[in-house]
Amino acid sequence: MSAGANMAIFRAYAQKSNPDSLPSSVLLSHSETCLTVFDAFPKSIFHFLVIPRVRLPFDVYQLADLRSLLKCEKNSAKELLTNLNQEADNVKKMIESEMLKKYGFKWEIWMGFHAVPSMQHLHLHILSADLCSPRMKLKKHYNSFHPKLGFFIHLSDVLSWFESDSSYYKTISQLKKSEYEPLLKEDLSCWKCDRNLSNMPKLKSHLQEDFDKLSDQEKAKAERKRKRVDDPAKTSSLQTSSNDELVRESEE
């Protein structure tokens, strides 16, 4: 597949009349308005994309990216993003279920857009808040998902723009490349503790250590809870103490 065709792959997915024809390695789920696919190059442990299907009143050009969508009639654009949000909530529940199954605990999940996307057709990223992945290789990869840097625009923020005054909406919705692309070159810093790291290997090691520490803490917490609830000896001891107390009270 050529580079140009690869960049337009989401558009091809969005135009399919029957998304079920996509392989299970690509498609997670779909609805009347959108479909969810696995990110082919995941940047977190869990990473999916929700893509709006091409439906009236929009054409493929209006759905090229967030910037083109926000040029459309405001109520229609808001409705499309609301549909994406609803589907994203369903995907979030699926991810949380898988988190509990594989790791025994849940952690934060982000939903948002790249201000300047590298792929054609609007797509909403849904990814777990860890950024631990073998596919996370370059500074621009990491900075494009850093939740506080600004290049990754949270869906909740985009939806809030519709409630702002018209002048702010007009300005913010322009999503000028000149304002966002320099963010990809910012120094590397941990999204949790803001610590600066000199290169990607050090950053990735730091992020993995942080996630492993969180995992250990959650496992220890779950084990303590299990012992409190399920320890037969403790339960028996508590019941015996309670019964003895009742006997003493009745004798008195």
Image: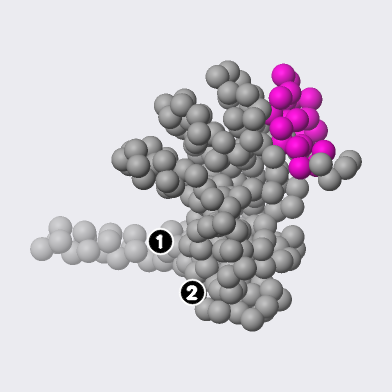
Residue 135: x and y, percent?
A: 74, 60
Q: How many marks?
A: 2
The disc label shown at residue 193, or none = 2
Q: Does dot 2 land on a helix, a strand or a loop? A: loop
Upstream in sequence: badge 1 or badge 2: 2
Disc 2 marks which amino acid?
Cys
x, y percent for residue 203: 64, 75
Residue at left offset 64%, top offset 35%? 64
For residue 41, above or below residue 76: below
Q: Residue furthest right?
A: 1
In the displayed structure image, the side of residue 59 where residue 248 appears, left or right: left
In this rendered view, identify the residue nearer to me: 114 or 102. 114
Residue 139 in the image: x percent, y percent? 67, 68
* Residue range (magenta): 5-24
Between 69 and 246, which is closer to the camera in this rendering?
69
Residue 235, labelled with which disc? 1
| Residue 53 in the image, given as x and y percentages of width and height | 63, 26
Mark 1: give few (<14), some (14-19) or many (20+) Cα within 10 Å. some
Residue 98 lies, with reference to residue 216, above or below; the image says above
